[in-house]
Image: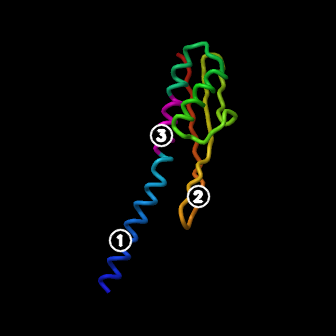
Amino acid sequence: MKTLRALIGLFVIVAVIYTAWKLVPPYFHDYQFQDVVSEEARMNTYTARSENDIRESIFKKAQDLDIPITRDQINVRREGQTVNISADYIVHVDLPAYPLDLKFHAGSKNKAY
């Protein structure tokens, strides 16, 4: 009986570690991507870069972070001294018994004073 409990306990520990191994990286990459989006909005409020240039810069950084996103999913709007950036994307995680899609939204709005 003690051996069975030990095996079940070991199985639970391994399952938790494996699940964390699969789920933590997408959340960490989203955190980094949100930082990139906020920085781009903040920096480009005071520049004359076009929406397409900003979008391309964000897309390249998303590729570096392994974010599964296309250029069309990155919305950049410049309205006078205000820059709005938003991006929605989905990360598919294959867990053995429960595959799931994690939905993320990165966005920032910055305006000059």
Dot 3 or dot 2: first in sequence order is 3
Q: Give percent across and percent down for residue 90.
A: 61, 47
Inter-mark Cα distance, 2 to 1: 24 Å
Label 2: few (<14), some (14–19) or many (≥20) C-alpha neighbours in 10 Å: few
Residue at position x 37%, y 66% in the image = 13
Q: Residue at x 56, y 38 (%)?
A: 106
Q: Which residue, given by chain and number where applicable, does mark 3 sit on?
A: 31
Q: Which of the 4 image quarters holds residue 110?
A: top right
Amino acid carrying label 3: it is: Tyr
Q: Is residue 9 left or right of residue 113?
A: left
Going by the numbered disc 2, the residue's amino acid type is Leu
Which residue position is annotated with label 1? 10
Q: Element type at marker 3?
A: helix
Residue at 66%, 22% (x, y): give it.
51
How crowded pointer 1 is (Cα within 10 Å; few <14, some 14-19, many 20+) is rated as few
- Residue 64 shown left or right of residue 74 in the figure: left
Residue 29 image offset from top left, x and y in percent: 49, 41
Find out whether the residues at labels 3 and 2 contact each other: C-beta distance under 8 Å. Answer: no
Mark 3, Cα crowd under 10 Å, few <14 / some 14-19 / many 20+, is: few
Residue 29 lies in the magenta-colored region: yes
Residue 78: which quarter of the image?
A: top right
Residue 59 included in the magenta stretch of the image: no
| Residue occupied by mark 2 | 100
The part of the chain drawn in magenta is 28-38
